[in-house]
Image: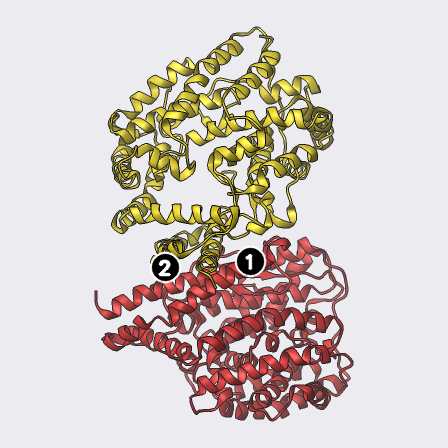
Chain colours: A yellow, B red
Amino acid sequence: MSAYDDLMAFQRETEALGEVAGRLGWDQETVMPLGAAEQRADEIAALEGVLHARRVDPRIGEWLEAAKPEGEVAAAQLRHIRRVYERTARVPARLAAELARVTSVSQGQWARARATDDFAAFAPVLENVVALKREEADCLAAGGDPYDALLDDFEPGATAANLSEMFGALRPRLVALRDAALASPVQPAALEGEFPETGQLEISRRLAIAFGYDFTRGRIDKAVHPFSSGSGNDVRITTRTAPLDPFNCFYSTVHEVGHAAYEQGVDPAYALTPLGRGVSMGVHESQSRIYENQLGRSQAFTGWLHSQMSDVFGDLDLGAGAFYGAVNRLHRGFIRTESDEVQYNLHVLLRFDLERQLIAGSLAVGDLEEAWNARFEADFGYPVERASQGVLQDVHWSVGLFGYFPTYTLGNVYAGCLYRALREAVPDLEADLSQGETAAATGWLREHLQRHGGLYPPRETVERACGFAPNEEPLLDYLEEKFGAIYGL
Amino acid sequence: MSAYDDLMAFQRETEALGEVAGRLGWDQETVMPLGAAEQRADEIAALEGVLHARRVDPRIGEWLEAAKPEGEVAAAQLRHIRRVYERTARVPARLAAELARVTSVSQGQWARARATDDFAAFAPVLENVVALKREEADCLAAGGDPYDALLDDFEPGATAANLSEMFGALRPRLVALRDAALASPVQPAALEGEFPETGQLEISRRLAIAFGYDFTRGRIDKAVHPFSSGSGNDVRITTRTAPLDPFNCFYSTVHEVGHAAYEQGVDPAYALTPLGRGVSMGVHESQSRIYENQLGRSQAFTGWLHSQMSDVFGDLDLGAGAFYGAVNRLHRGFIRTESDEVQYNLHVLLRFDLERQLIAGSLAVGDLEEAWNARFEADFGYPVERASQGVLQDVHWSVGLFGYFPTYTLGNVYAGCLYRALREAVPDLEADLSQGETAAATGWLREHLQRHGGLYPPRETVERACGFAPNEEPLLDYLEEKFGAIYGL
């Protein structure tokens, strides 16, 4: 066995154990008995301990030094392994353990503060998390930019400077589009009615099938928050239902199917290796978003969805044309996850700017709520009334996820680029979608992007698929055209 | 930290990882997508590799040497840890790996051979398994009896000599009872009818509640084979349904609830330690059997079950009296798991005698089918017609489980002893059971046996609960009295 083979054999076991950890998370959110929570925390801690020990195993350093990779695939494998090994080694064991300890309880503290709209109660906890993350960022940055070092965990190669430029170009046009749409005399109606759970789950299933989700290598369950979990041949998704809001269920499902399709679509030759999953959060989000929005919320596809809903629930109060408006209507609101295609990115840009200041130390946690509320009113035009609608709405910061939020909007930008290329590659796209048929579109995405897994760096992965340097123009053009038409702008 | 504390901290992590492995098994049998099977094998192998490395970690030897246990509990913990450490160390890594490799594929080979009734196709595989198990037994026995060394994995302290004496006393009285019952002019009728799955699952749930199963720390799912899995606060069971055979579902459920109640009933202070689960397979089976048979198939409890079935399915074709006979009737059959209280043990005794000869080398695998068929006809009175009804019916040997079968009958013997003590301790038992009320009985079992987990050796665990040296008389007396009454003997 060569050093490369030894390293890959070791890595395969680590990847397999990582899959096991992912499955524990799935189990916890879907089927675990409530009384098992404490024991489960011990189980996860034990498994994370094993994984951490493997990630810093000094043999990895020796194998990396001795390995002579042959070809593009082997070089990419080593690049991933080296990256994780060096990053993990930079964080002292004491700090890693302290971060794990603090963030294992801070989520519960956040949930309690959110339930009582009490940011002051949560601020000391968050201060502690931010201080630890700043310390971690300094270790990881090794003299570079600390925020970039955190961002690199989710989007290797991205920098705050590049994202700022891109987001800076997005913000004014999104704000203008939002203002124009909400001020327009044309206002799409909302879909009224109650839609029982069994019918919603039936349509969820039809949507998953329509988007090519492979049920022989996955399953759909209910959970409080929709998510996708696992890679390769065991990629499970969840959805949720609310009787008055069927679109939440349907588009959560399509979104998670997008994530799952990426994982299910990676070349099986990469199974249980670092190449065997989506390459970054941003590229992952590009898949979930293009499935959900550019394809799933298109006029053509909503026509098909309208027929499916009529089939399951009986006549709707809107015809297919108005139904398209109902699916896409902008509305006043405070919550990122309940937002629409236009305003969603404004939610993200706000968080990106604030979290950079937190990590840079130019914004104190004590001033965060005020800063949030001021920025929100500037971008959305109305004030935040409660912390649970504002600074306390997302779990991310409570568990130390800094550098994660921007990948949502980066994913939307990538989705915009991919959609531009996809429309050229699949001229019959609209005719397909109007029949609930996505095979040509999803097949193109699998062939040009998903199958590569981690073979190329994230941005290169998207560039190779769409054929041009990714930028924000296609997304903005798409949004302005789509919502211009819906709102008669 | 003392050496004992260090050892226990290490052990807790190992136990937690063992729970994770158990959960993977549950997942595989209940919810896993079919296409994930191969990937799952890699995940399980990686986790088993971690567990094996921990079990032979040389630090355990150092801690064991330095530890100064204080009190009964600490001494018992060390006894368990030392036992596993020494046993694991006795088997060379090469042999352990080869056994794992061979038995990971032999189950599939067995299943294929069973499907085509082709023992000859399976014989070479089984020969390989037997050869490896004999080699392992020699390593484990360290000069003692090889079969006892294997038995010790499932029933520490038991020996083939002791079991042979006990089983030798059982066999003639069971054969005589079986003959007399099947020759009697009094023959209970079978329950006729079709019983839809939803109703069976509803009654399953009522039965689990009636027997005190804690749903906040467990759940019931469907699976091909009923089983119980996990310990402490996450103990899950499965059941199955067949429309024409509702008792299979109901008594599988009660049986697994018995196993689960033992795990759920162990003193929480022992959680994630070697004391925190059932002490042996035999004692475990005593709990599942006393729940299923002595309590669940009693005349009093079947009266309540009759009312539940009438409630869910409408009027039955049998009244409560005849229903008791239908639940307990003996029938001709070949399959151990479909057998009744009397004949079940004859199935086990047959396997016990044959597997001892296989391990001793006095029976060749090539002669096994003939030996099986001859013994079956001697004990049951009619010939085996197909290998799938005979030597190929059980999975155990294919995966190397030698020394496991006798614990089934040992469990029945222990259940007989416990039931004798329980009847004295709970004078109102029959009145309770006739109302579907088991709290006094199951509370007595929890208090006198289940809560101790692994604190005492298996046989001592039972003796402390029943107050006398366990022996086969109470079981035989119970069976002869019960079936004598049913069959008018």
Q: Which residue is mark 2?
A: A59
Does A430 sit left or right of B88 as displayed? right
Task: Please state which amino acid type lies under the numbered disc 2.
Answer: Arg
> Looking at this view, is B159 or A10 the one in front?
A10
Q: Residues within 10 Å of mark 2 (few under 14, many from 20)?
A: some
Q: Residue at x 63, y 68 (%)?
A: B302
Q: Residues within 10 Å of mark 1 (few under 14, many from 20)?
A: many
Indicate the secondary structure of the residue bearing disc 2: helix
Residue B444: image x %, image y %?
Answer: 43, 71
Q: Which mark is residue A476?
A: none
> Looking at this view, is A451 or B446 the one in front?
A451
Q: Residue at x 64, y 20 (%)?
A: A324
Q: Residue A220 is drawn in which quadrant? A: top right
Does A140 sit left or right of A167 as displayed? left
> Looking at this view, is A368 or B266 the one in front?
A368
Indicate the secondary structure of the residue bearing disc 1: helix
Quarter that holds the C terminus of chain A: top right
| Chain to which the residue tagged by mark 1 belongs | B
**Residue A384 visible, this angle:** yes
Query: Is the residue A480 above or below the residue B446 in the image?
Result: above
Task: Please state which amino acid type lies under the numbered disc 1.
Answer: Arg
Query: Is the residue B254 above or below the residue A51 in the image?
Result: below
> Looking at this view, is B274 or B202 the one in front?
B274
Query: Is the residue B34 above or below the residue B476 in the image?
Result: above
Q: Residue at x 49, y 21 (%)?
A: A472
Question: Closer to the camera: disc 1 or disc 2?
Answer: 2
**Residue B470 visible, this angle:** no
| Chain to which the residue tagged by mark 2 belongs | A
Does A133 sit left or right of B324 as displayed? left
Q: Which mark is residue B40?
A: 1
Residue B83: image x %, image y %?
Answer: 38, 78
